[in-house]
Image (spheres, rainbow, N blue to C red):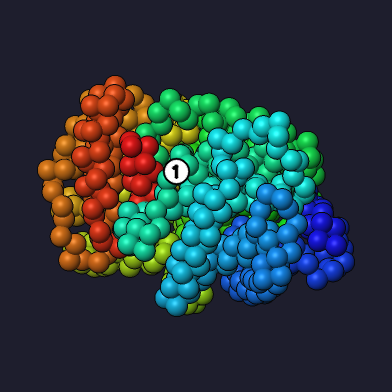
Amino acid sequence: HEIHGLEEAFEALDAFLDDNMVHATEVLKRDNGVVYYQLARTVIVFLQAILGFQHEDIRKASEVASMAEKTANRQYSLAHKGKLATSVHFDPGTEYNLAFCEAHLMNAVLLLLSESVLGSMKALYKLQHSFRILHDMYQSNPRIQVDYVPTEDDEPGNLIDEYTISGVRVCFGILHIILSSIPPNVSRVLQLIGLHGDRQTGLDLLWKASESPNIHGTMAVFALLQYFCGPAQVCDIDSKIMKDPLAHCEEILEQTKKRFNNGALWDLQTARLHSVHGRIQEAIDILQQPRTVQLTQIEYLLIFEKSLDCLYLHKYELSANSFLSLIKINSWSHALYAYAAAICMIELYREACAVLTRSDDPEAVAEAKTNAAKYKKLAMSHLEKTDNLIHQKKSFMQRGIPFEGYISRKLTKWKQRAQLMSKERGGMIIDLVDAVGVSPVNEIVYVWNGYKRMSKSDLDRTLSNLNREIEVVNSQEGIYQYPRYSTEEIDETLVLNVLRAAVLRNLGNLDECKKLLDEALILEKIQYKDKLRDEWAYPATLYEMGIYKWIEGGKTRESAVAAKKYIDKAAEYKHDYHLSSRVGLRIQTALESLK
Protein backbone atom coordinates (compact mmCIF):
# COMPACT_ATOMS: atom_id res chain seq x y z
CA HIS A 1 0.00 0.00 0.00
CA GLU A 2 2.70 2.47 1.05
CA ILE A 3 5.20 1.43 -1.62
CA HIS A 4 2.50 1.60 -4.29
CA GLY A 5 1.68 5.15 -3.21
CA LEU A 6 5.34 6.13 -3.39
CA GLU A 7 5.71 4.58 -6.86
CA GLU A 8 2.70 6.51 -8.14
CA ALA A 9 3.96 9.74 -6.59
CA PHE A 10 7.27 9.24 -8.42
CA GLU A 11 5.36 8.51 -11.66
CA ALA A 12 3.32 11.71 -11.34
CA LEU A 13 6.38 13.84 -10.68
CA ASP A 14 8.26 12.30 -13.59
CA ALA A 15 5.30 13.16 -15.85
CA PHE A 16 5.27 16.74 -14.55
CA LEU A 17 8.99 17.18 -15.21
CA ASP A 18 8.46 15.83 -18.72
CA ASP A 19 5.88 18.58 -19.32
CA ASN A 20 2.97 16.12 -19.18
CA MET A 21 0.71 17.71 -16.60
CA VAL A 22 -2.32 15.78 -17.86
CA HIS A 23 -0.82 12.40 -16.95
CA ALA A 24 0.53 13.74 -13.65
CA THR A 25 -2.98 14.87 -12.68
CA GLU A 26 -4.51 11.52 -13.65
CA VAL A 27 -2.03 9.58 -11.51
CA LEU A 28 -2.60 11.78 -8.45
CA LYS A 29 -6.36 11.17 -8.66
CA ARG A 30 -5.64 7.59 -7.50
CA ASP A 31 -4.78 8.92 -4.02
CA ASN A 32 -5.01 6.01 -1.55
CA GLY A 33 -4.49 8.15 1.54
CA VAL A 34 -0.71 7.76 1.78
CA VAL A 35 1.07 11.09 2.26
CA TYR A 36 3.20 10.67 -0.87
CA TYR A 37 0.30 11.73 -3.11
CA GLN A 38 -0.08 14.97 -1.18
CA LEU A 39 3.68 15.43 -1.18
CA ALA A 40 3.79 15.01 -4.98
CA ARG A 41 1.05 17.64 -5.33
CA THR A 42 3.06 19.92 -3.07
CA VAL A 43 6.20 19.53 -5.19
CA ILE A 44 4.24 20.33 -8.36
CA VAL A 45 2.49 23.45 -7.04
CA PHE A 46 5.69 24.52 -5.25
CA LEU A 47 7.69 24.42 -8.49
CA GLN A 48 4.91 26.24 -10.33
CA ALA A 49 4.94 28.93 -7.65
CA ILE A 50 8.69 29.52 -7.45
CA LEU A 51 9.09 29.39 -11.24
CA GLY A 52 6.29 31.87 -11.92
CA PHE A 53 6.26 34.11 -8.81
CA GLN A 54 2.52 34.70 -9.13
CA HIS A 55 0.51 35.65 -6.05
CA GLU A 56 -2.25 33.07 -6.46
CA ASP A 57 0.19 30.24 -7.22
CA ILE A 58 2.19 30.99 -4.07
CA ARG A 59 -0.93 31.17 -1.87
CA LYS A 60 -2.28 27.91 -3.29
CA ALA A 61 1.06 26.12 -2.95
CA SER A 62 1.36 27.17 0.70
CA GLU A 63 -2.10 25.74 1.44
CA VAL A 64 -1.24 22.42 -0.25
CA ALA A 65 2.09 22.26 1.61
CA SER A 66 0.33 22.86 4.94
CA MET A 67 -2.05 19.97 4.25
CA ALA A 68 0.88 17.69 3.41
CA GLU A 69 2.64 18.73 6.63
CA LYS A 70 -0.39 17.77 8.72
CA THR A 71 -0.87 14.42 6.96
CA ALA A 72 2.82 13.51 7.21
CA ASN A 73 2.96 14.49 10.88
CA ARG A 74 -0.12 12.39 11.65
CA GLN A 75 1.21 9.34 9.80
CA TYR A 76 4.61 9.76 11.46
CA SER A 77 3.00 9.75 14.91
CA LEU A 78 1.03 6.58 14.13
CA ALA A 79 4.07 4.73 12.76
CA HIS A 80 6.41 5.92 15.51
CA LYS A 81 4.08 5.14 18.42
CA GLY A 82 2.97 1.84 16.90
CA LYS A 83 6.56 0.93 15.99
CA LEU A 84 5.46 0.17 12.43
CA ALA A 85 8.82 -0.19 10.72
CA THR A 86 9.15 -0.40 6.94
CA SER A 87 12.93 -0.74 7.01
CA VAL A 88 15.66 -2.56 8.89
CA HIS A 89 17.86 0.51 8.50
CA PHE A 90 15.66 3.31 9.85
CA ASP A 91 13.51 3.92 12.92
CA PRO A 92 9.73 3.47 12.53
CA GLY A 93 8.16 6.50 10.86
CA THR A 94 11.41 7.96 9.51
CA GLU A 95 10.03 8.15 5.96
CA TYR A 96 7.00 10.11 7.19
CA ASN A 97 9.21 12.43 9.20
CA LEU A 98 11.16 13.13 6.01
CA ALA A 99 7.91 13.74 4.10
CA PHE A 100 6.90 16.20 6.83
CA CYS A 101 10.29 17.88 6.58
CA GLU A 102 10.06 18.18 2.79
CA ALA A 103 6.62 19.82 2.98
CA HIS A 104 7.84 21.96 5.91
CA LEU A 105 10.83 23.18 3.90
CA MET A 106 8.80 23.99 0.79
CA ASN A 107 6.27 25.88 2.89
CA ALA A 108 9.09 27.89 4.48
CA VAL A 109 10.30 29.04 1.07
CA LEU A 110 6.75 29.94 0.05
CA LEU A 111 6.22 31.95 3.23
CA LEU A 112 9.45 33.84 2.54
CA LEU A 113 8.13 34.67 -0.92
CA SER A 114 4.99 36.11 0.66
CA GLU A 115 7.26 38.84 2.07
CA SER A 116 4.97 39.56 5.03
CA VAL A 117 6.48 40.01 8.48
CA LEU A 118 4.32 37.23 9.95
CA GLY A 119 5.09 34.97 6.99
CA SER A 120 8.82 35.56 7.41
CA MET A 121 8.67 34.70 11.12
CA LYS A 122 6.82 31.46 10.36
CA ALA A 123 9.32 30.69 7.61
CA LEU A 124 12.28 31.12 9.96
CA TYR A 125 10.72 28.70 12.43
CA LYS A 126 10.10 26.14 9.68
CA LEU A 127 13.64 26.52 8.32
CA GLN A 128 15.10 26.06 11.79
CA HIS A 129 12.84 23.06 12.47
CA SER A 130 13.66 21.48 9.09
CA PHE A 131 17.38 22.04 9.58
CA ARG A 132 17.30 20.33 12.98
CA ILE A 133 15.33 17.31 11.70
CA LEU A 134 17.56 16.85 8.65
CA HIS A 135 20.73 17.32 10.69
CA ASP A 136 19.63 14.66 13.18
CA MET A 137 18.69 12.23 10.40
CA TYR A 138 21.98 12.79 8.61
CA GLN A 139 24.13 12.39 11.71
CA SER A 140 22.27 9.38 13.12
CA ASN A 141 22.44 7.13 10.06
CA PRO A 142 25.77 6.49 8.29
CA ARG A 143 23.98 5.17 5.18
CA ILE A 144 22.82 8.71 4.39
CA GLN A 145 26.24 10.33 4.69
CA VAL A 146 28.12 11.14 1.48
CA ASP A 147 31.23 9.17 2.41
CA TYR A 148 29.31 5.96 3.18
CA VAL A 149 30.64 2.88 1.37
CA PRO A 150 28.36 -0.22 1.38
CA THR A 151 29.84 -3.47 2.70
CA GLU A 152 29.12 -7.09 1.74
CA ASP A 153 27.18 -7.57 4.99
CA ASP A 154 24.76 -4.74 4.21
CA GLU A 155 21.19 -5.84 3.75
CA PRO A 156 19.69 -4.38 0.56
CA GLY A 157 17.32 -1.48 1.03
CA ASN A 158 13.84 -1.11 -0.47
CA LEU A 159 12.16 1.72 -2.36
CA ILE A 160 11.35 3.52 0.87
CA ASP A 161 14.98 3.33 1.97
CA GLU A 162 16.04 4.85 -1.36
CA TYR A 163 13.44 7.58 -0.90
CA THR A 164 14.67 8.32 2.63
CA ILE A 165 18.38 8.37 1.83
CA SER A 166 18.09 10.45 -1.34
CA GLY A 167 15.48 12.73 0.25
CA VAL A 168 17.63 13.66 3.25
CA ARG A 169 20.59 14.31 0.97
CA VAL A 170 18.76 16.56 -1.46
CA CYS A 171 16.81 18.50 1.19
CA PHE A 172 19.77 18.99 3.52
CA GLY A 173 21.97 19.86 0.53
CA ILE A 174 19.56 22.49 -0.80
CA LEU A 175 19.13 23.96 2.67
CA HIS A 176 22.91 24.31 3.07
CA ILE A 177 23.17 26.01 -0.34
CA ILE A 178 20.33 28.42 0.41
CA LEU A 179 21.73 29.40 3.80
CA SER A 180 25.25 29.88 2.43
CA SER A 181 23.97 32.16 -0.37
CA ILE A 182 21.85 34.52 1.73
CA PRO A 183 23.07 38.17 1.74
CA PRO A 184 25.29 39.10 4.73
CA ASN A 185 22.77 41.32 6.55
CA VAL A 186 20.25 38.45 6.64
CA SER A 187 22.72 35.62 7.28
CA ARG A 188 23.96 37.35 10.43
CA VAL A 189 20.43 37.23 11.85
CA LEU A 190 19.95 33.57 10.88
CA GLN A 191 23.19 32.56 12.58
CA LEU A 192 21.75 33.85 15.86
CA ILE A 193 19.10 31.10 15.71
CA GLY A 194 21.54 28.40 14.66
CA LEU A 195 20.99 28.54 10.90
CA HIS A 196 24.28 28.52 9.05
CA GLY A 197 24.89 26.75 5.78
CA ASP A 198 28.12 25.36 4.40
CA ARG A 199 28.25 25.55 0.63
CA GLN A 200 30.66 22.67 0.09
CA THR A 201 28.64 20.37 2.34
CA GLY A 202 25.53 21.27 0.38
CA LEU A 203 27.19 20.64 -2.98
CA ASP A 204 28.61 17.29 -1.83
CA LEU A 205 25.16 16.18 -0.71
CA LEU A 206 23.56 17.25 -3.98
CA TRP A 207 26.18 15.53 -6.14
CA LYS A 208 25.60 12.33 -4.17
CA ALA A 209 21.81 12.68 -4.37
CA SER A 210 21.99 13.27 -8.13
CA GLU A 211 23.05 9.63 -8.53
CA SER A 212 19.64 8.42 -7.29
CA PRO A 213 17.29 7.20 -10.07
CA ASN A 214 14.20 8.84 -8.56
CA ILE A 215 12.59 12.26 -8.19
CA HIS A 216 15.11 13.24 -5.52
CA GLY A 217 17.95 12.55 -7.93
CA THR A 218 16.23 14.68 -10.56
CA MET A 219 15.65 17.51 -8.08
CA ALA A 220 19.32 17.33 -7.09
CA VAL A 221 20.27 17.74 -10.76
CA PHE A 222 17.88 20.69 -11.05
CA ALA A 223 19.28 22.28 -7.87
CA LEU A 224 22.88 21.87 -9.05
CA LEU A 225 22.06 23.44 -12.41
CA GLN A 226 20.23 26.29 -10.69
CA TYR A 227 23.22 26.90 -8.43
CA PHE A 228 26.02 26.71 -11.00
CA CYS A 229 24.06 28.76 -13.55
CA GLY A 230 22.76 31.15 -10.89
CA PRO A 231 24.48 32.15 -7.61
CA ALA A 232 27.82 30.66 -8.67
CA GLN A 233 27.78 32.87 -11.77
CA VAL A 234 27.16 36.14 -9.97
CA CYS A 235 30.47 35.63 -8.16
CA ASP A 236 33.80 36.56 -9.74
CA ILE A 237 35.99 34.48 -7.42
CA ASP A 238 35.78 31.70 -9.98
CA SER A 239 38.69 29.60 -8.82
CA LYS A 240 39.85 26.39 -10.48
CA ILE A 241 37.08 24.38 -8.79
CA MET A 242 34.39 25.87 -11.06
CA LYS A 243 35.37 24.26 -14.39
CA ASP A 244 34.93 20.63 -13.40
CA PRO A 245 31.45 21.13 -11.85
CA LEU A 246 30.21 22.90 -15.00
CA ALA A 247 31.46 20.02 -17.15
CA HIS A 248 29.79 17.58 -14.75
CA CYS A 249 26.58 19.63 -14.92
CA GLU A 250 26.54 19.20 -18.69
CA GLU A 251 26.95 15.44 -18.29
CA ILE A 252 24.14 14.99 -15.77
CA LEU A 253 21.88 17.31 -17.78
CA GLU A 254 22.34 15.15 -20.88
CA GLN A 255 21.50 12.05 -18.83
CA THR A 256 18.42 13.75 -17.40
CA LYS A 257 17.18 14.86 -20.84
CA LYS A 258 17.16 11.22 -21.95
CA ARG A 259 14.55 10.56 -19.25
CA PHE A 260 12.58 13.75 -19.93
CA ASN A 261 12.85 14.28 -23.67
CA ASN A 262 9.68 16.40 -23.84
CA GLY A 263 10.46 18.69 -20.91
CA ALA A 264 10.92 22.36 -21.83
CA LEU A 265 12.37 22.85 -18.34
CA TRP A 266 15.47 20.95 -19.45
CA ASP A 267 15.77 22.99 -22.66
CA LEU A 268 15.88 26.01 -20.37
CA GLN A 269 18.72 24.48 -18.36
CA THR A 270 20.60 23.66 -21.58
CA ALA A 271 20.27 27.28 -22.72
CA ARG A 272 21.50 28.54 -19.36
CA LEU A 273 24.60 26.37 -19.57
CA HIS A 274 25.32 27.73 -23.07
CA SER A 275 24.98 31.28 -21.75
CA VAL A 276 27.25 30.57 -18.77
CA HIS A 277 29.93 29.36 -21.20
CA GLY A 278 29.60 32.57 -23.24
CA ARG A 279 27.68 30.87 -26.05
CA ILE A 280 24.88 33.39 -25.74
CA GLN A 281 23.59 33.23 -29.31
CA GLU A 282 23.33 29.44 -29.04
CA ALA A 283 21.33 29.96 -25.84
CA ILE A 284 18.96 32.37 -27.58
CA ASP A 285 18.50 29.94 -30.48
CA ILE A 286 17.39 27.23 -28.03
CA LEU A 287 15.12 29.56 -26.07
CA GLN A 288 13.22 30.80 -29.12
CA GLN A 289 12.68 27.41 -30.74
CA PRO A 290 8.97 26.84 -31.49
CA ARG A 291 7.53 24.48 -28.89
CA THR A 292 4.28 23.73 -27.12
CA VAL A 293 4.68 24.28 -23.39
CA GLN A 294 1.92 23.11 -21.05
CA LEU A 295 3.14 25.13 -18.08
CA THR A 296 2.98 28.91 -18.44
CA GLN A 297 5.60 29.17 -15.68
CA ILE A 298 8.14 27.43 -17.93
CA GLU A 299 7.11 29.57 -20.90
CA TYR A 300 7.68 32.65 -18.74
CA LEU A 301 11.18 31.53 -17.77
CA LEU A 302 12.12 30.74 -21.37
CA ILE A 303 11.15 34.27 -22.43
CA PHE A 304 12.70 35.97 -19.39
CA GLU A 305 15.99 34.16 -19.95
CA LYS A 306 15.96 35.12 -23.63
CA SER A 307 15.29 38.75 -22.69
CA LEU A 308 18.39 38.87 -20.49
CA ASP A 309 20.58 37.06 -23.02
CA CYS A 310 19.54 39.57 -25.68
CA LEU A 311 20.69 42.39 -23.39
CA TYR A 312 24.14 40.84 -23.18
CA LEU A 313 24.37 40.76 -27.00
CA HIS A 314 23.05 44.34 -27.36
CA LYS A 315 19.95 43.03 -29.15
CA TYR A 316 17.87 45.72 -27.50
CA GLU A 317 14.77 45.62 -29.70
CA LEU A 318 14.44 41.85 -29.37
CA SER A 319 15.01 42.12 -25.62
CA ALA A 320 12.39 44.87 -25.26
CA ASN A 321 9.79 42.93 -27.23
CA SER A 322 10.48 39.80 -25.18
CA PHE A 323 10.10 41.65 -21.89
CA LEU A 324 6.83 43.23 -23.06
CA SER A 325 5.45 39.83 -24.09
CA LEU A 326 5.77 38.70 -20.47
CA ILE A 327 2.99 41.09 -19.47
CA LYS A 328 0.48 38.78 -21.19
CA ILE A 329 1.55 35.58 -19.44
CA ASN A 330 2.88 36.58 -16.01
CA SER A 331 1.58 38.96 -13.35
CA TRP A 332 4.67 39.14 -11.13
CA SER A 333 5.84 42.64 -12.12
CA HIS A 334 4.42 44.30 -15.21
CA ALA A 335 6.25 47.46 -14.16
CA LEU A 336 9.61 45.67 -14.37
CA TYR A 337 8.84 44.36 -17.86
CA ALA A 338 7.79 47.81 -19.10
CA TYR A 339 10.82 49.43 -17.45
CA ALA A 340 13.18 46.91 -19.08
CA ALA A 341 11.66 47.71 -22.48
CA ALA A 342 12.02 51.44 -21.79
CA ILE A 343 15.71 51.30 -20.89
CA CYS A 344 16.41 49.19 -23.99
CA MET A 345 14.87 51.97 -26.09
CA ILE A 346 16.90 54.57 -24.18
CA GLU A 347 20.10 52.74 -25.08
CA LEU A 348 19.11 52.64 -28.76
CA TYR A 349 18.16 56.32 -28.61
CA ARG A 350 21.55 57.21 -27.18
CA GLU A 351 23.37 55.15 -29.79
CA ALA A 352 21.47 57.00 -32.54
CA CYS A 353 22.26 60.37 -30.97
CA ALA A 354 25.94 59.43 -30.80
CA VAL A 355 25.93 58.88 -34.57
CA LEU A 356 24.39 62.33 -35.04
CA THR A 357 27.28 63.97 -33.22
CA ARG A 358 30.11 61.86 -34.62
CA SER A 359 29.29 61.04 -38.23
CA ASP A 360 29.90 63.18 -41.33
CA ASP A 361 28.05 60.72 -43.58
CA PRO A 362 24.76 62.35 -44.66
CA GLU A 363 23.01 58.99 -45.07
CA ALA A 364 24.15 57.80 -41.66
CA VAL A 365 23.05 61.07 -40.08
CA ALA A 366 19.63 60.89 -41.75
CA GLU A 367 19.11 57.31 -40.58
CA ALA A 368 20.30 58.19 -37.07
CA LYS A 369 17.90 61.13 -36.93
CA THR A 370 14.99 58.86 -37.83
CA ASN A 371 16.09 56.24 -35.31
CA ALA A 372 16.63 58.78 -32.54
CA ALA A 373 13.10 60.10 -32.93
CA LYS A 374 11.66 56.57 -33.13
CA TYR A 375 13.44 55.19 -30.07
CA LYS A 376 12.88 58.31 -28.01
CA LYS A 377 9.14 58.09 -28.66
CA LEU A 378 9.09 54.40 -27.70
CA ALA A 379 11.18 55.04 -24.58
CA MET A 380 8.82 57.81 -23.47
CA SER A 381 5.81 55.57 -24.04
CA HIS A 382 7.29 52.67 -22.06
CA LEU A 383 8.40 54.97 -19.22
CA GLU A 384 4.89 56.41 -18.99
CA LYS A 385 3.49 52.88 -18.90
CA THR A 386 6.00 51.93 -16.20
CA ASP A 387 5.00 54.94 -14.11
CA ASN A 388 1.31 54.05 -14.37
CA LEU A 389 1.96 50.41 -13.46
CA ILE A 390 4.07 51.37 -10.44
CA HIS A 391 1.19 53.41 -9.07
CA GLN A 392 -1.43 50.78 -9.91
CA LYS A 393 0.40 47.90 -8.25
CA LYS A 394 2.08 48.81 -5.00
CA SER A 395 2.75 45.36 -3.63
CA PHE A 396 3.59 41.73 -4.13
CA MET A 397 1.65 39.92 -1.43
CA GLN A 398 1.79 42.32 1.54
CA ARG A 399 4.88 44.39 0.71
CA GLY A 400 6.32 46.12 -2.30
CA ILE A 401 8.43 44.16 -4.76
CA PRO A 402 12.05 45.22 -4.12
CA PHE A 403 12.80 45.76 -7.80
CA GLU A 404 9.69 47.92 -8.17
CA GLY A 405 10.99 50.07 -5.32
CA TYR A 406 14.21 50.51 -7.29
CA ILE A 407 12.26 51.45 -10.43
CA SER A 408 10.02 53.89 -8.57
CA ARG A 409 13.07 55.63 -7.09
CA LYS A 410 14.69 55.85 -10.53
CA LEU A 411 11.61 57.45 -12.09
CA THR A 412 11.27 59.97 -9.27
CA LYS A 413 14.96 60.84 -9.53
CA TRP A 414 14.74 61.41 -13.28
CA LYS A 415 11.59 63.54 -12.92
CA GLN A 416 13.29 65.77 -10.35
CA ARG A 417 16.36 66.06 -12.55
CA ALA A 418 14.22 67.01 -15.57
CA GLN A 419 12.56 69.77 -13.53
CA LEU A 420 15.92 71.08 -12.31
CA MET A 421 17.40 71.03 -15.81
CA SER A 422 14.36 72.82 -17.18
CA LYS A 423 14.76 75.53 -14.56
CA GLU A 424 18.49 75.87 -15.33
CA ARG A 425 17.67 76.28 -19.04
CA GLY A 426 15.11 79.02 -18.62
CA GLY A 427 12.02 76.87 -18.71
CA MET A 428 13.04 74.72 -21.66
CA ILE A 429 10.99 71.49 -21.74
CA ILE A 430 13.18 68.53 -20.82
CA ASP A 431 11.74 65.16 -21.69
CA LEU A 432 12.11 62.45 -19.08
CA VAL A 433 14.25 60.35 -21.45
CA ASP A 434 16.78 63.19 -21.60
CA ALA A 435 17.08 63.35 -17.81
CA VAL A 436 18.15 59.73 -17.40
CA GLY A 437 21.59 59.27 -15.86
CA VAL A 438 24.19 56.55 -16.35
CA SER A 439 23.06 53.70 -18.62
CA PRO A 440 20.25 51.90 -16.73
CA VAL A 441 20.62 48.92 -19.08
CA ASN A 442 24.16 48.41 -17.86
CA GLU A 443 23.02 48.54 -14.24
CA ILE A 444 20.76 45.56 -14.97
CA VAL A 445 23.54 43.75 -16.84
CA TYR A 446 25.92 44.37 -13.93
CA VAL A 447 23.68 43.05 -11.16
CA TRP A 448 23.04 39.89 -13.23
CA ASN A 449 26.79 39.74 -13.97
CA GLY A 450 26.21 39.68 -17.71
CA TYR A 451 29.70 41.07 -18.38
CA LYS A 452 31.12 37.72 -17.32
CA ARG A 453 29.34 36.06 -20.25
CA MET A 454 30.15 38.63 -22.95
CA SER A 455 32.67 38.19 -25.74
CA LYS A 456 35.49 40.70 -26.20
CA SER A 457 33.63 42.47 -29.01
CA ASP A 458 30.50 42.85 -26.88
CA LEU A 459 32.56 44.10 -23.94
CA ASP A 460 34.30 46.61 -26.23
CA ARG A 461 30.94 47.89 -27.43
CA THR A 462 29.72 48.16 -23.84
CA LEU A 463 32.82 50.11 -22.81
CA SER A 464 32.41 52.45 -25.77
CA ASN A 465 28.81 53.12 -24.77
CA LEU A 466 29.81 53.77 -21.15
CA ASN A 467 32.69 56.04 -22.16
CA ARG A 468 30.14 58.01 -24.17
CA GLU A 469 28.48 58.85 -20.84
CA ILE A 470 31.21 61.35 -19.96
CA GLU A 471 30.99 63.32 -23.21
CA VAL A 472 29.22 66.66 -23.45
CA VAL A 473 26.85 66.69 -26.42
CA ASN A 474 24.66 69.51 -27.68
CA SER A 475 21.21 69.56 -29.22
CA GLN A 476 20.83 68.25 -32.77
CA GLU A 477 18.13 69.84 -34.90
CA GLY A 478 15.30 69.44 -32.46
CA ILE A 479 16.42 66.08 -31.11
CA TYR A 480 17.73 66.82 -27.65
CA GLN A 481 20.65 64.59 -26.78
CA TYR A 482 20.33 63.49 -23.16
CA PRO A 483 22.16 66.30 -21.35
CA ARG A 484 24.03 64.31 -18.69
CA TYR A 485 23.60 64.28 -14.98
CA SER A 486 25.52 66.80 -12.93
CA THR A 487 29.10 65.88 -12.00
CA GLU A 488 28.10 66.83 -8.46
CA GLU A 489 25.86 63.77 -8.29
CA ILE A 490 28.43 61.55 -6.62
CA ASP A 491 26.33 58.41 -6.83
CA GLU A 492 26.13 58.72 -10.64
CA THR A 493 29.91 59.04 -10.81
CA LEU A 494 30.24 55.95 -8.64
CA VAL A 495 27.81 54.00 -10.82
CA LEU A 496 29.70 54.95 -13.98
CA ASN A 497 33.07 54.11 -12.42
CA VAL A 498 32.00 50.72 -11.09
CA LEU A 499 30.38 49.74 -14.41
CA ARG A 500 33.41 50.77 -16.45
CA ALA A 501 35.76 49.08 -13.97
CA ALA A 502 33.81 45.82 -14.19
CA VAL A 503 33.96 45.86 -18.00
CA LEU A 504 37.69 46.65 -17.98
CA ARG A 505 38.32 43.83 -15.52
CA ASN A 506 36.54 41.38 -17.78
CA LEU A 507 38.62 42.68 -20.69
CA GLY A 508 41.78 42.04 -18.67
CA ASN A 509 42.72 45.74 -18.38
CA LEU A 510 43.49 45.71 -14.67
CA ASP A 511 45.47 48.97 -14.60
CA GLU A 512 42.60 51.08 -15.92
CA CYS A 513 40.18 49.12 -13.75
CA LYS A 514 42.12 49.96 -10.58
CA LYS A 515 42.43 53.60 -11.58
CA LEU A 516 38.65 53.95 -11.78
CA LEU A 517 38.10 52.11 -8.50
CA ASP A 518 40.69 54.27 -6.72
CA GLU A 519 38.87 57.37 -7.94
CA ALA A 520 35.60 55.97 -6.65
CA LEU A 521 36.97 55.02 -3.23
CA ILE A 522 38.41 58.51 -2.73
CA LEU A 523 34.80 59.64 -2.48
CA GLU A 524 34.62 57.52 0.70
CA LYS A 525 31.39 56.18 2.13
CA ILE A 526 28.66 58.57 1.13
CA GLN A 527 26.06 59.67 3.63
CA TYR A 528 22.87 59.27 1.61
CA LYS A 529 20.57 61.94 2.93
CA ASP A 530 18.76 61.92 -0.41
CA LYS A 531 16.84 58.66 -0.66
CA LEU A 532 16.81 58.93 -4.45
CA ARG A 533 20.53 58.27 -4.77
CA ASP A 534 21.94 55.00 -6.13
CA GLU A 535 23.24 53.66 -2.87
CA TRP A 536 24.22 50.23 -4.23
CA ALA A 537 27.23 51.69 -6.06
CA TYR A 538 29.44 52.08 -2.97
CA PRO A 539 29.32 48.44 -1.72
CA ALA A 540 29.66 47.36 -5.36
CA THR A 541 32.84 49.45 -5.62
CA LEU A 542 34.28 47.77 -2.53
CA TYR A 543 33.36 44.39 -3.99
CA GLU A 544 35.04 45.24 -7.31
CA MET A 545 38.22 46.32 -5.53
CA GLY A 546 38.22 42.99 -3.72
CA ILE A 547 37.91 41.13 -7.03
CA TYR A 548 40.73 43.24 -8.47
CA LYS A 549 42.97 42.30 -5.53
CA TRP A 550 42.14 38.62 -6.03
CA ILE A 551 43.01 38.63 -9.74
CA GLU A 552 45.97 41.02 -9.57
CA GLY A 553 47.55 38.92 -6.82
CA GLY A 554 47.43 35.77 -8.92
CA LYS A 555 44.51 34.13 -7.05
CA THR A 556 46.82 33.02 -4.23
CA ARG A 557 46.23 32.71 -0.50
CA GLU A 558 47.78 36.16 -0.04
CA SER A 559 45.53 37.70 -2.68
CA ALA A 560 42.53 36.05 -1.00
CA VAL A 561 43.40 37.86 2.24
CA ALA A 562 43.70 41.18 0.39
CA ALA A 563 40.43 40.58 -1.44
CA LYS A 564 38.56 39.61 1.71
CA LYS A 565 39.52 42.90 3.34
CA TYR A 566 37.47 44.86 0.80
CA ILE A 567 34.65 42.36 0.38
CA ASP A 568 34.19 42.25 4.16
CA LYS A 569 33.75 46.03 4.07
CA ALA A 570 31.15 45.61 1.35
CA ALA A 571 29.36 43.03 3.50
CA GLU A 572 29.39 45.40 6.47
CA TYR A 573 27.46 47.98 4.49
CA LYS A 574 24.27 47.34 6.45
CA HIS A 575 21.83 49.67 4.74
CA ASP A 576 18.81 47.99 3.20
CA TYR A 577 19.48 49.65 -0.15
CA HIS A 578 17.80 48.94 -3.47
CA LEU A 579 19.49 46.05 -5.33
CA SER A 580 20.94 44.88 -2.00
CA SER A 581 19.70 41.34 -2.65
CA ARG A 582 21.54 41.13 -5.98
CA VAL A 583 24.72 42.90 -4.83
CA GLY A 584 24.59 41.09 -1.49
CA LEU A 585 24.41 37.74 -3.25
CA ARG A 586 27.61 38.55 -5.14
CA ILE A 587 29.29 39.61 -1.91
CA GLN A 588 28.18 36.52 0.01
CA THR A 589 29.19 34.04 -2.70
CA ALA A 590 32.57 35.74 -2.99
CA LEU A 591 33.16 35.42 0.75
CA GLU A 592 32.16 31.75 0.64
CA SER A 593 34.56 31.17 -2.26
CA LEU A 594 37.44 32.84 -0.42
CA LYS A 595 37.14 30.53 2.59
Q: Tell which residue pokes out farthest to the top in this image.
A: 554
The image quadrant that residue 42 belongs to is: bottom right
Which quadrant of the rendered structure holds the C terminus?
top left
The image quadrant that residue 240 belongs to is: top left
Q: For the point 32% across and 30% down, which residue is it?
A: 505
- Of residue 57 and residue 591, the one placed in the foreground of this image is 591
Q: Position of residue 268 (x, y in %)?
A: 65, 44
**Where is 345 relative to 151, above or below?**
below
Q: Is residue 355 visible?
A: no
Q: Which residue is mark 1?
A: 199
Circle 1: element type: helix
- Of residue 395 and residue 22, the one placed in the foreground of this image is 22
Q: Position of residue 27 (x, y in %)?
A: 86, 61
- Amino acid type for the residue under numbered disc 1: Arg
Q: Position of residue 46 (x, y in %)?
A: 64, 62
**Where is 480 relative to 82, above or below?**
above
Q: For the point 66% across and 67% down, which residue is it?
A: 80
Q: Residues within 10 Å of mark 1 (few under 14, many from 20)?
A: many
Q: Position of residue 143 (x, y in %)?
A: 62, 42
- Of residue 155 and residue 53, the one placed in the foreground of this image is 155
